[in-house]
Image: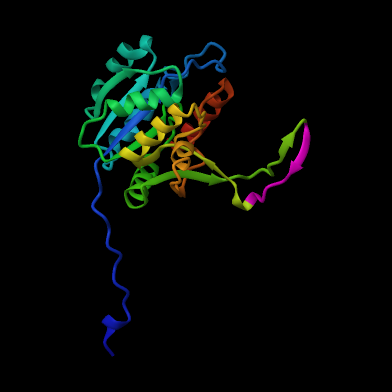
Amino acid sequence: MDITKLTKPARKLLPLKTCGAVIVAAGTASRMGGIDKVMATLGGEPMIVRTVRQFQDCEAISEIVIVTREDLILPITSLCRAYPKVKAVVQGGKSRQESVALGLNSLSDKTKLAAVHDGARPLVTWQVIDRVVRAANTYGAAAPAIPVKDTIKVVEGRVVKNTPDRATLFAVQTPQVFDFDLLRAALTKAKLEEAQVTDDCSAVERMGMSVKIVEGDERNIKVTTPMDLKIAEMLLEELS
């Protein structure tokens, strides 16, 4: 028997396109009770440093641009001198959409894929980053997500209108990775139409583009409140 007839050919992998990362850290941290979450200490170092390091360590990422507030440009630039992939630290805009667009403008001309990440997700791993980049390399748009555990209710006027099937619901995380030109066009369209989108996937979805969902990580939480920071500290201890 010819064994070659029983063996499926290996799937051909596409060459990995050049991917630049935009880390968005331009928020006002209004729900942090006076704590500047970008610079908040996590595991003995500023949270933004932990976030940047994971992108530095991911081979699928070629360069990094950090978008932040004007008052943090110099401090973050100083903190990130140890990470050669950080090419620029730039001032953000009035909205997250505008900040992402400014970050995209600062990536090099060779960039073909753009990974957009919340600076307040310091527990992302390079493995998750790599997984999403490779999915976007194939499908043009990808994001990590985890299944929703709670039952979700659609409510209007404090009255339940319907209960979506929990099996179809996922909590989407970052980084979200896209074809560079697609994302820039999607953000431009959203701006022109004054559409408020909650994440970059939403902007791309408005263009009629499907987003590939890949396995996220429950530890990849977004630090939004002081309680989130305490949870991040506990999760970090488990990882150590």
Name the residue: 27% across, 58% down. Answer: 13
Q: What's the residue at 74%, 34% (across, down)?
A: 156
31 relative to 188, above or below: above
In magenta stretch: residue 199: no
- Looking at the image, residue 45 sits to the left or right of residue 17; the answer is right
Looking at the image, the residue that sits furthest to the right is 159
Q: Position of residue 22 (x, y in %)?
A: 34, 30
List x then y, in percent, for residue 84.
Answer: 21, 28
Residue with the most extreme front position = 193
Asked whether residue 160 is drawn in magenta, I would say: yes
Q: How is the image coloured?
A: rainbow
Q: Position of residue 123 (x, y in %)?
A: 44, 33
Count of marks placed on residues: 0
Q: Is residue 54 above or below residue 168?
A: above
Q: Quadrant of residue 240?
A: top left
Name the residue at 65% across, 49% down: 166
The answer to whether 9 appears left or right of 93 in the picture is left
Q: Tell which of 79 and 14 is nearer to you.
A: 14
- Residue at image position (45%, 31%) is 190
Whether residue 84 sits left or right of residue 154 in the image: it is left
Q: Which residues are magenta?
A: 158-166
Task: Identify the image quadrant of the N terminus.
Answer: bottom left
Residue 185, quarter of picture: top left
